[in-house]
Image (cartoon, grey):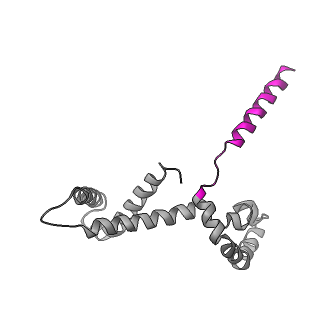
Amino acid sequence: MFWLLETAKAAEHGEKAAETAHHTPIIVELVNHYFGEPVYQLQMRYTYPLWKSFFAKFHTTPEAVFGPYSPETAIPWYTVMFVIACILSVTIIWILKGKLSTEEPGPGQQTLEVGVLAVRDMLADIVGPHGLKYFPIVMTFAVLILVSNLMGLFPL
């Protein structure tokens, strides 16, 4: 009989946790507010029928896999954050590239050089000398991952 009371306490705790659960970031809500309707219409016209026919083979629906389709959820949070990370990465690289100087390297240039040399040496050690031809794409991913991880520290 006392186990019923424990179940009731656990249910109350679950309700409190649900109230304080993770919500959609404000920036994602703004993006969906302004761009959600056209993206939703595009999804309904082109991608939804394709997913519906594909998932019918597995006896499920797109809603069961992706969640409900609506203008408020048309652009997922991870897509918005990835676009922001790409914009920040390009901006950071552009700002650091514009201040390069061989005569008087600043602290930003020295930090950039240390990062570039670390990634280049790591690539040469792991892949070998022919791996340096992949350096531009590896360094681009390194900067993108760094910016994405730093964005995770700050709630948007």
Q: Is residue 125 magenta?
A: no
Residue 63 placement (x, y as % from top left): 75, 63
Q: Quadrant of the N terminus?
A: top right
Nearer to the camera, 50 or 153: 153
Task: Give the residues in magenta.
Answer: 1-26
- The picture quadrant where one finds residue 89 is bottom left
- Where is residue 129 drawn, in percent x and y? 24, 65
Residue 17: in magenta span: yes
Q: Name the outermost residue toward the left.
A: 103
Question: Who's the residue at 73% across and 75% down the image?
Answer: 44
Q: Residue at x 76, y 31 (%)?
A: 10
Q: Is residue 128 left or right of residue 40?
A: left
| Residue that lies at the very extreme toward the top in this rendered image | 2
Identify the residue at image location x=71%, y=68%: 71
Q: In which quadrant of the rendered view does residue 88 lie?
A: bottom left
Q: What predominant SS class does the magenta segment belong to?
A: helix
